[in-house]
Amino acid sequence: MATTFCTYLIFLLSFTFTIFNLSSSSSPSESDILLSFKASIQDSKNALSTWSNTSSNHYCNWFGISCSTTKPISVTSINLQSLNLSGDISSSICDLPKLSYLNLADNVFNEPIPLHLSQCSFLETLNLSNNLIWGTIPSQISQLGSLKVLDLSRNHIEGNIPESLGALKNLQVLNMGSNLLSRDVPAIFGNLTKLEVLDLSQNPYLVSEIPKDIGELGSLKQLLLQSSSFQVLGEAAFKSSLDSEGESSCYNAPEYGYNKKPSEQLDVYSFGVVLLELVSGKQAYPKEENDESLDIVKWVRRKVNITNGVQQILDPRISHTFHHEMIEALNIALSCISVVPQKRPSMVDVVRDLQSLESRTCIANLKDTSEEQSISM
């Protein structure tokens, strides 16, 4: 009986160890996951030389790796920026259960945005900027519900902006500048109430009106739209573009010659010039006998300093009906073209002021129409 029991016990222990080993083999260690990720990458500079199980160096001390400070210790951050890395971004990276930060910016990854990155459900920062990423933005990106920072700028991403981006309600920074995005921008920004930075600049094929819901983003601090083909207004008569590299250099702020890097202040200045064109009904270079050589900015600044100069600026076809509103729009434009960049309003404030002006103008117009109808009756 004792022999039978011992035999049974040995069998049970053997079975238990077998199950344990199978379980262990089906759940690779985090160091194995990182090595699998490394195996899919071409590392010409040998920057990941510390990534090795043969050394006594713990994987939390490997180059570019940060781990949690509390137990169980787990990888939370991978920062491999500017290492000339190429190859494939392996799906194994999403097997790291606490990975919240992934920065692969300034490398030479040449592939579409990997669909499997949508499985990294705890990611808060995803930076793939300044690579050779191509193709479209996958709709599966909406599965990254924890994402706070998404930077896809300076790549070759094309196609439309997917509506699924509107599901990323925790986004604080969305940078898709310097790509090949096209078509209309969907009305998704009303959902992104935590957004602080939005960059859609340098997308020459992005032909769209500025979405109205951008003006409702109370947390937005920086809005970059320059060198994209956004239309200022929806009316067919006012399809002017915000392209700061158009036919006239007067669209560029004075400081543009010193620092040609995109900025919100440059964007606001260019917008102000376009608004001057709308308010005055004139092109960037008014062709008048005494002001033939002046661009619109110099022309307006000269006019506002003389008696009745403001009346000469306003488009007479509109000013007789909306005189006060036109003056208010002119003041917004003048604030945008301030010589001192720090004195210019933010793009968010400009959009809000124009939306407020539009709302008040429409209400006043409806009131006047109603009164006229009452008199006629």
Image (cartoon, helix red, strand yellow):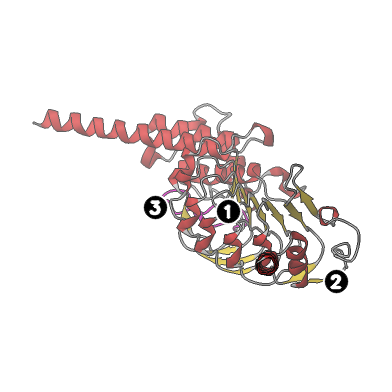
Residue at image coords 52%, 32% = 331
Residue extending furthest toward the left: 377
Crowding at dot 3, Cα within 10 Å, few <14 / some 14-19 / many 20+, comes out as few
Mark 3 → mark 1, Cα distance in angstroms: 24 Å
- First of labels 3, 2 by sequence position: 2
Q: How crowded is mark 1: few (under 14 residues within 10 Å), some or many (20 or more)?
A: many
Amino acid, disc 3: Ala
Up/down of 266 relative to 330, above or below: below
- Left or right of residue 265: residue 208: left
Taking the view exactly as shown, the residue that stands out farthest to the front is 1
Residue 237 bears which disc, if any?
3
- Tell me if residue 162 can be seen: yes
Callout 2: SS = loop
What range of the chain is rendered magenta? 228-246
Residue 338's label in the rendered image is: none
Q: Name the residue under label 1.
A: 200
- The answer to whether residue 289 of the structure is visible from this angle is no
- Residue at image point 39% right, 52% down: 237
**Residue 288 lies in magenta, yes or no?**
no
Residue 294 coordinates in the image, percent (x, y): 61, 45
Please tell me which residue is depicted at 30% across the width and 32% down the height of the picture.
Answer: 363
Q: What element carries label 1?
A: loop
Q: Which residue is labeled 2 in the image?
A: 44
Distance (Cα) linking label 1 and label 2: 32 Å
- The kind of residue on which mark 1 rests is Leu
Q: Distance between the residues labelled 3 and 2?
A: 55 Å
- The percent position of residue 136, horizontal first and vertical second, equals 55, 67
- Residue at the top extreme, as displayed: 307
Q: How many labels does the image show?
A: 3
Could you tell me the amino acid type at mark 2?
Answer: Ser
